[in-house]
Image (cartoon, rainbow, N blue to C red):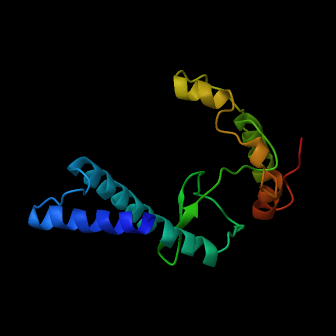
């Protein structure tokens, strides 16, 4: 009985849309429109869902660790062979350091003697940076410290202090 109603609805819709005639006992134009909208939504859901399900069934997630990730920021797009493959997650190093502290470490590593002067900079963005809004201590994926990098680049003059 249900299948008969579906076939009758499809035939009635066809006759109404193509020939402009309305069979007695078939649905009103409102019902035919509702059937058309449902068919359209189901078609769109299938057109979007089937390829996505096929992709998810045939692929697996992957991660990559880069030895040098300079120039990358959280949210940057990642391309594999020119095809978008995802986005860079927020990342951070193994330590949270201040800029004056990093400057002093660099001066020690390069053997230079200079005063490190802190200059207050006004502004909302700088205030957010001072508050640590750009830091991701929960995602500390970095392996080496700043001093280790300085030692590798400038020799054994760098030491923590």
Q: Is residue 98 above or below residue 38?
A: above
Q: Quadrant of the C terminus?
A: top right
Question: Which residue is depicted at the point 44% across and 65% down?
Answer: 1
Q: Is residue 84 visible?
A: no
Q: In the rendered image, which quarter is residue 44 located in?
A: bottom left
The image position of residue 78, as x and y in percent, is 55, 65
Name the one closer to the observer, 4 or 79.
4
| Left or right, 36 with reference to 67 | left
Question: Which residue is depicted at the point 85% across and 55% down?
Answer: 157
Question: Which residue is depicted at the point 61% across and 57% down?
Answer: 88
Q: Is residue 137 above or below residue 116?
A: below
Name the one closer to the observer, 158 or 144.
144
Q: Is residue 95 visible?
A: yes
The image position of residue 62, as x and y in percent, is 69, 70
| Left or right, 161 with reference to 58 | right
Q: In the rendered image, which quarter is residue 22 located in?
A: bottom left
The image position of residue 128, as x and y in percent, is 61, 28
| Left or right, 47 with reference to 27 | right
Q: How many marks?
A: 0
The image position of residue 153, as x and y in percent, is 75, 63
Q: In the rendered image, which quarter is residue 18 located in?
A: bottom left
């Amino acid at each position: 009985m249900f299948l008969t109603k579906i076939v009758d609805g499809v035939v009635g819709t066809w006759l109404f849309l193509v020939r402009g005639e309305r069979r007695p006992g078939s649905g009103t134009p409102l019902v035919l429109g509702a059937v058309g909208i449902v068919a359209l939504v189901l078609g769109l859901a299938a057109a979007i869902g089937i390829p996505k399900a096929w992709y998810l069934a045939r692929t697996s997630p992957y991660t990559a660790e880069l030895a040098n990730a300079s120039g990358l920021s959280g949210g940057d797009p990642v391309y594999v062979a020119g095809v978008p493959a995802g986005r860079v997650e927020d990342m951070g190093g193994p330590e949270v350091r201040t800029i004056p502290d990093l400057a002093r470490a660099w001066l020690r590593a390069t053997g230079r003697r200079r005063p490190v002067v802190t200059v207050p900079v006004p502004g909302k963005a700088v205030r957010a940076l001072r508050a640590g809004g750009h830091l991701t201590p929960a995602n500390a994926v970095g392996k080496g410290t700043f001093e280790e990098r300085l030692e590798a680049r400038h020799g054994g003059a760098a030491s923590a202090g």
